[in-house]
Amino acid sequence: MQIENETQNETSWPDHPKEFPLIMTPTEAAQFLRLDQTGHTPKSACRTLNYWRDRGELKATKYARRVWFLKNELELFLKVKTKE
């Protein structure tokens, strides 16, 4: 289940949300993880999310033909990464 880039422009990020929803698109998840502030483009951030998912480090949900990330899974991912 590969994440497809959902932005119209693959080189520019949408505005950073003031508050993140409980279920996020790959772009929102990348922004939640602050990949937009580390030199990633939206496209490269989706590849990074795929990499972490393929390694079993990050969980995602697929429904309605789209990939979604639960906020609590992203928070758990960050906690595990902080401990390493």
Image (cartoon, rainbow, N blue to C red):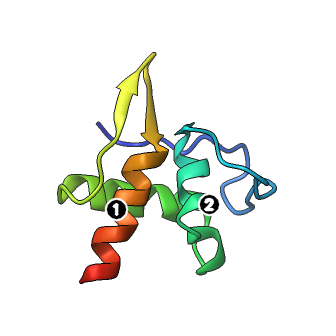
Q: Amino acid at mark 1?
A: Phe
Task: From the image, state whether disc 2 or disc 1 is nearer to you.
Answer: 1
Tell me, for residue 31, which label it has, or none. 2
Note whether 61 is above or below 70 in the view shown.
Answer: above
Instruction: From the top left corner, tell me how far across and down residue 75 is, in percent.
Output: 43, 58
Which residue is under mark 1?
Answer: 77
Residue 77 is drawn in which quadrant? bottom left
Quadrant containing the N terminus in the rendered view: top left
Q: How many other residues sit within 10 Å of disc 1, few (<14), some (14-19) or many (≥20)?
A: some
Q: Which residue occupies 48% across, 46% down? A: 71
Q: Which residue occupies 41% across, 43% down? A: 3
Given residues 36 and 10, the one toward you in this image is 36
Q: How many other residues sit within 10 Å of disc 2, few (<14), some (14-19) or many (≥20)?
A: many
Instruction: From the top left corner, tell me how far across and down residue 23 is, in percent.
Output: 53, 36
Given residues 59 and 54, the one toward you in this image is 59
Quadrant containing the C terminus in the rendered view: bottom left
